[in-house]
Amino acid sequence: MVLIDKRKEKIANLIKIEGFSAEEIYDLISIPQDSTRGDYTLPCFKFAKTFRKSPVQIAEILKEQLKDPKGFDSIEAVSGYLNFTLKSEDVIKEIIENVVEKGSNYGDSDIGKGKTVCLDYSSINIAKPFHMGHLSTTAIGAALYRMYKKMGFNAVGINHLGDWGTQFGKLIVAYKKWGDTLKGDVTVEGLNSLYVKFHDEADNDPSLEDEARAWFKKIEDGNKEALELYDFFKKVTLEEVKKVYKRLNVTFDSWNGEAFYNDKMDAIIERLEELNLVELSEGAKIVNLAKYEDNPEKSQTPPCLLVKADGATLYATRDLAAAFYRKKTYDFYKSLYVVAYQQNLHFSQIFRVIELMGEPWYKDLVHVAFGMVSLESGALSTRKGNVVLLEDVLNKAVAKSLEIITQKNPNLKNKDDVAEKIGVGAVIYSALSTARIKDKVFSYDKVLSFEGETGPYLQYSNARCLSVLRKAEIEYQNPEKAKEAFSNLTSEEIEGISDQYSKELVMLIDRFPFVVFDALEKYEPYILSKYLIDIAKSFNKFYMENRILNAEKAYVRSRLSLVYATHIVLEEGLKLLGIDSPQEM
Ligand code: ARG
């Protein structure tokens, strides 16, 4: 699947080389880093065999064959490359008018039409704190979710809740014994402290473990009191996390967690047994994955554990059932699991079992792994079970933002609202700012800086665009008015945005849809984050180099249109990442 660049396609179609299809030529053409080498470039190395000539000569020959086609300022053969510079005036006009026409729909595509993508992200655990360690899965998953929608896919966001396991038996015991020591409303923090207390006490009194097992059995058997407590823990947790999700602009279409698969595992195990994939090992049911490798004796691959000797199912069993359920329910084109790399083994086992079952869609399962986050000030959790809550990080970032804007812009209206957007945006951006597999160190000062490669820098650049548009009395919030304001730009006006800085910005704006598409192909939101930084930097250069409101009269409108187009890309790009854009800051 490729998102077609119409301009590049046109160039590809001009070039006829025996043995190479237009598609192959299309794939070879790229956009040079350095704009002095044209808008598009075709490296001629691959054609050496066909021509029996050097790439330098081939580029010359191809240039001769083209005979100055229409629509280019120049076509040049330079050291084995054929460089195409499009007719500046036409492309600039076309690109800007397209953005103005589409407004916030700029970059939308229907390439994913009819295809469903499941995304499993955030997937928190009931009665456990929503901590800083959940930031990456939540931010990356939700960003990919929005980008899939933008590309026309049907995206299904799934919060695969950790809502099953013997820990709920323990929690019931602890709650019944010490629940009244919790002050005020029951919170996740309170529940977690009970859980910690249970472990402390159970060290001295092993009978607590038996009680816990008995209560878990009651949950499994549908005992009324047990279920009521279990549901209560779930409700307390969900109410709390939903507040945080709201601040992060994160949504889900399904909250089916591990418990949902209780009645769906038997069928999978039966199927595995029919296929002779199950072995008994000390009473446990396993899939001996090593056996299916080329060199079983030497294999280090551990088995996939399905059912313990006591009959209990496992995390993996639930994930197998979930994968089948999602395939059946959504008939996905792809099913993504945005989960830390610590679970690499788990997912490779699940995917392998599904492959061994002969299901061709095992290929469509993707573990979107990511690295760890730590705080500059140290680890994220202590042995006592204290963790850095995501909500606390958000609050602190917002408080610091408020200090910064109060200092920078004392007269700003709605300071609290703006601080919320900056603080939360900065935290989200930090999770999306580098390749996901990298471990990250979180520093408040770095993520909140208005100058580095940060969320606030992007928001600030957008706010700068808006401030210019306001001064020019462009009603940028009304797409129809914006269209009116920038309709029918004349050649003379376009000249006002034909200098090097403006043109670079225009050509960058043109990349937006392809960047989103590329980010999806690689499951890397940071490709979009990085691109937005490039846009902001390019915009700030343009802004420094060109007068806008007090430019020559003929240039004012076109320069404003470029400011508007920049704003559209920044705001829409930030929105895809989950970041709100303040109007002023
Ligand atoms: N709740 C799990 C954890 O906190 C993550 C679940 C990820 N999704 C999945 N389908 N296994 O580690």
Image (spheres, grey):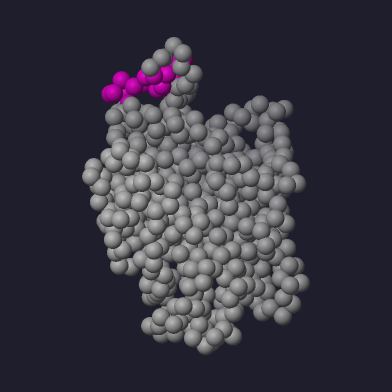
Above or below, 267 relative to 232: above
| Quadrant position of the C terminus in the picture | bottom right
- Asked whether 154 or 532 is in front, the reply is 532
> What residue range appears in magenta?
272-293
Along the line of sight, the residue nearer the viewer: 433 or 330: 433
Q: Residue at x 48, y 21 (%)?
A: 302
The answer to whether any part of residue 110 appears in the image is no
Give the left or right position of residue 301, taking residue 458 as reference: left
Residue 214 visible in image: yes
User: Is residue 292 found inside the magenta-colored segment of the image?
Assistant: yes
Magenta stretch containing residue 301, yes or no? Answer: no
x, y percent for residue 567 = 52, 71
Query: Where is residue 258 drawn, in percent x and y?
Result: 46, 41
**Residue 3: where, in percent of width, then height?**
34, 55
Question: Could you tell me which residue is drawn at 46 percent across and 64 percent down?
Answer: 507
Of residue 388 and residue 199, the one placed in the foreground of this image is: 388
In the rendered view, tell whether residue 155 sits above or below residue 358. Answer: below
